[in-house]
Image (cartoon, grey):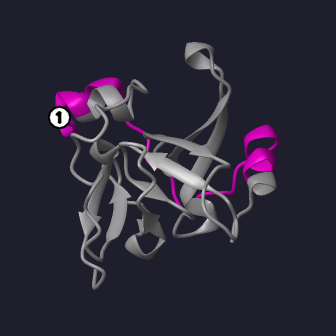
Amino acid sequence: MLRWIDVIIFAKYSNPEPRRRVEKTAEEWQQQLTPEQYQVARQKSTERPYRNAYCRNYEPGLYACIGCGNLLFDSDEKYHAISGWPSFTQPIAKGAIKYAFDDSHGMKRIEVMCNVCDCHLGHVFHDGPDPMGLRYCINSVSLQKLDKST
């Protein structure tokens, strides 16, 4: 399980090596994604809180990247954080997520992206539940939900 110190080390020094890489031009991303998906996933925007697909959805499933299908989160790690966005305590695997320091909007945060295609997912904070204390605050529009049997 990842701890806050692991997240800091990944952001500062080097992220886990992804199993594969997906790279596309801006035009290719615009053709694949809806305008809202493109704005969030590729231009690092944020969807509106509470009015998104997975904020209040706690059905079993797996969450994958909207850009490349990389598995990111399991519903077993999802919890009600009252943040307005889906919140998870851990990624599905250590190498699923890429971390970067984000000083935008006058805040000091750690951005989380898909480690395969660099789609912006949201941010991770160290105010989550025990035992690891992580809260991955993720934009629904950056995710696609799959059945666990997938």
For the residue pair 37 and 128, the one nearer the viewer reads as: 128
For this view, does 140 lie left or right of residue 100? left
Furthest residue in direction front, as rendered: 82
- Give the x, y percent position of residue 126: 68, 49
Q: Residue at x 32, y 52 (%)?
A: 143
In the rendered image, which quarter contains the C terminus? Answer: bottom left
- Give the x, y percent position of residue 31: 18, 32
Q: Tell whether position 10 is magenta.
A: yes
Q: Residue at x 80, y 39 (%)?
A: 12
In the rendered image, which quarter contains the N terminus? Answer: bottom right
Q: Residue at x 53, y 51 (%)?
A: 136
Q: As displayed, is residue 124 above or below residue 134?
A: above
- Give the x, y percent position of residue 62: 35, 70
For this view, does 41 lie left or right of residue 93? left
Furthest residue in direction top, as rendered: 106
Question: How many discs mark residues in the rendered view?
Answer: 1
- Residue 10 visible here: yes
- Give the x, y percent position of residue 32: 21, 39
Q: Amino acid at mark 1?
A: Thr
Q: As displayed, is residue 70 above or below residue 141?
A: below
For the residue pair 104 and 69, the one nearer the viewer reads as: 104
Question: On the image, which quarter does residue 106 sit in?
Answer: top right
Q: Which residues are magenta?
A: 7-36
Badge 1 local density, few (<14 within 10 Å), some, or many (20+)? few
- Residue 28 visible here: no
Q: Which residue is mark 1?
A: 34
For this view, does 71 lie left or right of residue 8? left
Q: Residue at x 70, y 65 (%)?
A: 132
Q: As displayed, is residue 103 above or below residue 70?
A: above
For the residue pair 126 and 15, the one nearer the viewer reads as: 126
